[in-house]
Image: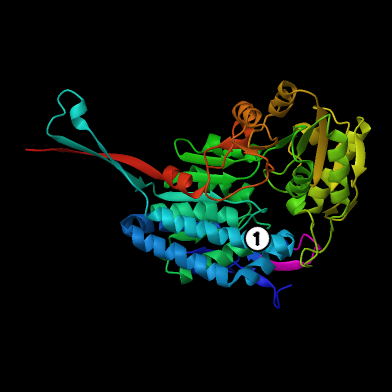
Amino acid sequence: MPSTPLHYGSLINGEERKGSGRKSLDVRSPFDGEVIGTIDLASDEDIELALATSQSVFRNTMKKMPAHRRAEILRETGERLAERTEEFAQVLALEAGKPIRDARGEIGRAVQVLYFAADEAKKIEGELVPMDSAVGGENRIGMVRRIPIGVVVAITPFNFPLNLALHKLGPAFAAGNTVVLKPAEKTPFTSYMLAKLFEEAGLPKGALNLVMGIGSDMGEKLVTDDRVSKITFTGSPKVGKMIKNQAGLKKVTLELGSNSPNIIFNDGDIETAATSLVKGAFAFAGQVCISAQRIYVQKGVAQQFQETFVRQVKALKVGNPKEETTDIGPMITEEAAIRAEEWVAEARDQGAVLLTGGTRSGNLFEPTVLVNVEPQMKVVCQEVFAPIVSIIPFETEEEVIGYANDSDFGLQAGVFTKDINRAMRLADELETGGVWINEMSTYRQDNYPYGGVKLSGVGKEGVKYAVEDMTDIKFVGIKLG
């Protein structure tokens, strides 16, 4: 626990907005329920000020700032974050219940995102259009320029509250935009600390305005405002659909989750696949959008894989996220853990067989492996967002492609095989935004295009690709003579 309880409000134009009769919300540790601190919720007046400030600072400051200065601020923020890794990791472990080793890993990735963004700030390029390729285009020059779009509203989730915030903030600032950031109310403190870090690194006041609150209470005000040019959201399909319907003509990036398939063929490396997928299924208690939820194993190696996998799962340590030896911490709320427990019980009632796990203690849910599942079971066809995985046998390549694609989601998939021709066929046939060969679906680097199809969302993250979507293309033509 911090030496004194944290108490933060919204940060707007560089000033903290708290007290003055605002409603407040206690933030509790997912592990033991202790109050970590309190946030004061943004009022309607605060939200209006955040939007007005963002628009003003964009027009008067950020859009005029040279690329080299934007890059300097991003790099400086990254360097400061790296220096304070342990401080951020400890708070992240407290508010999200993330095991401390994983929390440090998230800080490391966040630093990398800032460095990627600093590099991309200097790479925003246009092009010349050959005007004389059209009849009548002689003596004309055509240029295409990329310009910042304006105010970006970023709405972030609880599971990666720092890194996923930076996947929105980094590209926005690299492009020259301003941001109104609404962090998850369950994990607001690292976002506040990050906003102060940007300020220390020289980001102009009002370029980042952080509003504290509950999404259902304030989201519509942010999403529908005409001063906003883009919404970038990570969360549930239900909320994502609502945002898309409310956004009108604004640009929208939505990352909405999945029930990722992972496929192991007879010629795959079983030990490597098992070790990889234990991590991929149970990292952060399965509360990861690309968590390995469905594991399809060809029948020739199904028993070998199952035994190897379950043996490693049983060795995982569940407990206090602040202990160095903990592999799996708590789920974010007891309600989430109860839902996981109920889904497993329902699957067992429908004929599924439990190989390990399935028990709950408060917010802690044991890593759970099911077999003998059916496609219509919730643990298979919906997103569990919990430490639950199903192992499903298959015979042929054609069969497993059908199984994998029989989903409303399509974010990432993993395929384990030594056959390059098969690997490339699967890469083409799987209906997902990304396919990893000989790697789990849960692996993500922060510099490649990341985003899904179907209910998994629209648009791409990954710094370079996000920068492209946070700029508009403007044509400039010059007639000579």
Looking at the picture, does residue 142 appear above or below residue 87?
Answer: above
398 to 113, vertically: above or below:
above
- Front in this rendered view, residue 200 or 466: 466
Q: Is residue 286 above or below residue 317?
A: above
Residue occupying image coordinates x 54% and y 34%: 245
Tell me where residue 375 appears, x and y as whole percent.
80, 27
For the stretch drawn in magenta, what is the main secondary structure? loop
Indicate the quadrant containing the N terminus: top left, top right, bottom left or bottom right.
bottom right
Circle 1: element type:
helix
**Is 214 located above or below residue 382 in the figure?**
below
Side of 13 where 340 appears, left or right: right
Image quarter (top left, top right, bottom left or bottom right) of the C terminus: top left
Amino acid type of disc 1? Gly
Look at the image and give the residue range highlighted in magenta: 29-38
Residue sitting nearer the eye, 342 or 15: 342
Q: Which residue shows up at 62% across the image and 33% down it?
A: 432
Q: Where in the figure is residue 338, as x and y percent of width and height?
A: 84, 47
Camera sees residue 424? yes
Q: Residue furthest left?
A: 481
Residue 42 versus residue 27: which sits nearer the camera? 27
Residue 294, position as x, y percentages in the image:
76, 36
- Say whether residue 437 is magenta: no
What residue does disc 1 label? 105
State which quadrant residue 26 falls in: bottom right
- State the image quarter where residue 315 is shown: bottom right
| Count of number-bearing discs | 1
- Residue 17 can be seen in this image: no
List x then y, in percent, for residue 117. 46, 55
Q: Residue at x 56, y 68 (%)?
A: 82
What is the residue that sits farthest to the bottom in this orientation? 3
